[in-house]
Amino acid sequence: MITPELLALLPLWYVAFLLSLTCHEAAHALAAKWGGDPTAYHAGQVTLNPMPHVQREMFGTIAVPLVTFLLNGWMLGWGSAPYDPYWEQRYPRKAAWMALAGPLANFALVLVATAVIQIGLATGAFQLPDGGIGFAELVSGTGVADGFARFTSLLFSLNLLLGCFNLLPVAPLDGHSVLGLILPEETHLRWLAFIRDPMPSMIGLVAAWQFFGYLFHPIWTGALNTLIYFGRLQ
């Protein structure tokens, strides 16, 4: 149900979502350029300007996030960075680092949000909410500080979720390429050929969506407990 409270949170959600996605895709593009594939660089995606990323995937960066938020109260969406598949076949380990760069960017944003939250708690600008912690309300504040607290909470939560979800070894998620860092090259190339077939890829993606909650719950709980523990030391 669409409520005034939900609509009031829409700008914070969308800015946090778009920032997270932009950093993720820009990290892919930069890592590919460093690895010798300038495809995304020439497409203008080695940038924190969200517009090139939005223009490449307008459906996944505008329509789907807004619709899922209005229907469910949370945002689902996607972006993409182009790359040369022949480069990936020639340099699967470099391609694996390119794939890992996206989730690493998300985890870097988690660390940034953690630092901001701890600074806010230490200075008194943020407080731990009395009514319990939620995905979009890890900390609270008063006035303008409350909006910033919610945005920082979203930045922490969204990026922890995105970073973990994208590491699942299923196409089109990044994890299926990241396996190249631990598998023998020949085995990894066979895995890439198999997982990109539409049927196993579709089955894997549906399974990942169904079971990710069970995998993510202990990670989420551990991250929150750590955040709260250090927050109460302030």
Image (cartoon, grey):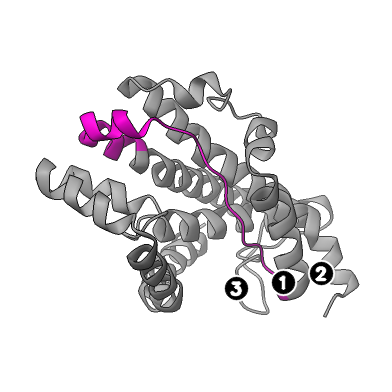
Quadrant where the N terminus lies?
bottom right
Q: Tell me the residue at 38%/69% (across/down).
A: 222
Q: What is the C-alpha distance between the residues marked 2 and 3?
A: 17 Å
**Which amino acid, mark 1?**
Gly
Q: Secondary structure at mark 3?
A: loop
Q: Nearer the N terminus, badge 2 or badge 3? A: 2
Please determine whether, in this image, residue 151 is positioned above or below residue 84: below
Q: Tell me the residue at 54%/38% (across/down).
A: 23
Q: Secondary structure at mark 1?
A: loop
Specify the quadrant of the image occupied by residue 44: top right
**Decide: marks 1, 2 in contact (CB < 8 A)?**
yes
**Decide: marks 2, 3 in contact (CB < 8 A)?**
no
Q: In the image, which is nearer the foreground, mark 2 or mark 3?
A: 2
User: At which x and y percent is residue 99?
Assistant: 36, 41
User: Which residue position holds label 1?
Assistant: 73
User: At which x and y percent is residue 151?
Assistant: 69, 53
User: At which x and y percent is residue 36?
Assistant: 33, 19
**Which amino acid, mark 3?**
Ile
Q: Secondary structure at mark 2?
A: helix
Residue located farthest toward the right when viewing the structure as drawn: 4
User: Which residue position holds label 2?
Assistant: 6
Q: Which residues are magenta?
A: 72-98
Q: What is the C-alpha distance between the residues marked 1 and 3?
A: 16 Å
Q: Is residue 12 left or right of residue 194?
A: right
User: Which residue position holds label 3?
Assistant: 133
**Which amino acid, mark 2?**
Leu
Q: Can residue 91 be seen?
A: no
